[in-house]
Image (cartoon, rainbow, N blue to C red):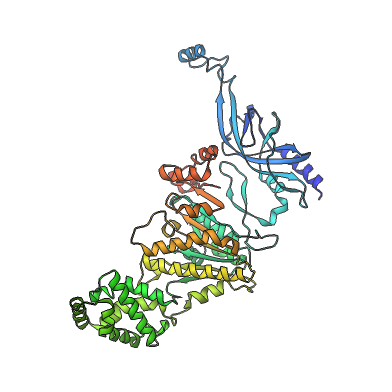
Amino acid sequence: MTAHSDAKSIDRLIAQAERLGVIGSPSSTAGLALDILGPAVGKKLVGELALFHFGQDGVPHYALGQITEVQLKNVWHEDPAMRSLIRQRGRVDAVSESQDTHLGKMVISAVFKQGGPGGFEPSILGTVPSTGTAIHQVNDEVLGQLLSPYRDQLFYLGHVYGSKPQLPLWFKHFGRGPDGANEAYHLGIFGKTGSGKSVLAKMALVAYSRYPNMAILVMDPQGEFARDLRGGGASHDEFTLPVRGIINAFGKPTYVMTVRNLVLDRWDLFEQILLESQFFERLTVSRGENRELASDILCDRLRKAKVTLKHLFKRESFDKAWKALGDEKVQRVFYRSDGPRGRFNEALKEADPDEFFDQYWTPVTELFREDRPQARTVEKALAWLLKPDAKNRPILVVDLSREQAHGIFWNERIQGLVIKRLLDGINQAAEHFYKDDQTLNALVMIDEAHRLAPRYLAQDDDVGRAVRSVLIDAARTTRKYGLGWFFISQTLSSIHPEILQQLRIFFFGFGLGLGQEFESLRQLIGSSSTALDLYQLFRDPHSAFDAASRQSYVGN
């Protein structure tokens, strides 16, 4: 089909679509004023997706946009004398209703021009069409014709807010080729609990799973993504999104790794986790410099004794550690004075080694044990995920929820240390690919991002500060490596601004319309007040009378 026949086809579809109004005055390329036609006055217009045909540089163009506001004006009702009469009678038949005019505002979101190999290609609104230019309601047929050159690349996420057409979006992988963006980009989904952000994130995950050459890592602190991939679907009000079934249909390999089969593989991690445990606390070593020195010297002695991380769980490894703590040379490293050293020795003598091994040593060393069922070290897991010559690279979901940590020492700080290890590993892999003139072509999805990259942190939260620092640096630098980041958060104001500044694509769900959240949203959107006005019309999905009438809204 030629570009000329494409134009004729879409012109026929537009002519058949309902006419809502015409372009009025004053209008600009930033926003158009609409004169609403009489038959359309009784329709719901706010949020409606509309389209008009205009000429630019001698080429037919088609502009898509949303109606963001409708105003009613009646100049006779604004006259003081007429207002007095209306106050007495309620209405004046000669002017009330019959002299009403309805004015709309329309913001342009996309422009296409005739031409290109597929018939249409993206353009911009570089001029203002003349007054009287017809504004038509958009339907799926019109959208399908306009986007026909990109049909195979589109993914539909529900419907346009306040309108019936399905919402088409591009989700491209980060590599080269017709389906690739040739670079990575960062995304964010923000909305309060119940706004639908989790389901939207899973739909985006499904969209990216179409690409066999793209690797996806999901950091899952609450285990929500893992449950869906195990159980097959994400339930949301009146429908279930069959996440696992769709991904399996695309042929994308998936693997859910929990803390039960994720093996830590660094001595510094063991040292830090031992610090967090009650091991030294039960031996009267106070938190702070003394405990840090004690943990450091103990790990050093174990390494010198040829104890490996994967064998730390064995009783002979514990016995070597216990014996080292009884060495005066070791004690003098963290207790130089006789008094504290004497109290430590007394606690060591009174302690039951069997109790310490079972209750305080084993839960920590289990994290480093490689002979657990289906266990894999962090390094091996990432190597499997990012294998460059794999024909179909997988989705790896790391379930870091407390429910999966039975029998293992686990809390939020340990979770943070594990996340940092994963982040460091994938960043190092991205740099390695870049040095070899390869693109990583990988996406990292992070749920509960406000906990990992918060704007503010407690002064003593060194683990949280380290995790946040890695994420901020990654958001700034990894785009050129082909590594993109997808942040999912219940709040916007609590996310560190350095992260927000690096995001290219935003999705905003319900719940950001008040206080600090709205102020943060305003700063991101800038001067687009009409978009903010439309966003504030979003209704709380849970304010519906029943589950069947609930609706989730997301602004992009």
Which image quadrant is residue 108 in? top right
| Percent x, y of residue 49 | 62, 40
| Percent x, y of residue 556 | 56, 47
Which residue does the image show at 45% across and 50% down from the upper left?
492
Q: In the figure, 529 relative to 484: above or below?
A: above
| Left or right: where 421 falls relative to 159 | left
**In this orientation, which residue lies closer to the viewer: 527 or 208?**
527
| Percent x, y of residue 228 | 49, 63
Q: Is residue 485 visible?
A: no
**In this orientation, which residue lies closer to the viewer: 189 or 228?**
189
Q: In the figure, 115 relative to 316: above or below?
A: above
Q: In the figure, 14 relative to 191: above or below?
A: above
| Percent x, y of residue 319 | 31, 86
Q: Is residue 471 visible?
A: yes
Which residue does the image show at 38% across and 71% down from the upper left?
405
Q: In the figure, 101 relative to 89: above or below?
A: below
Say how many tags the image has: 0
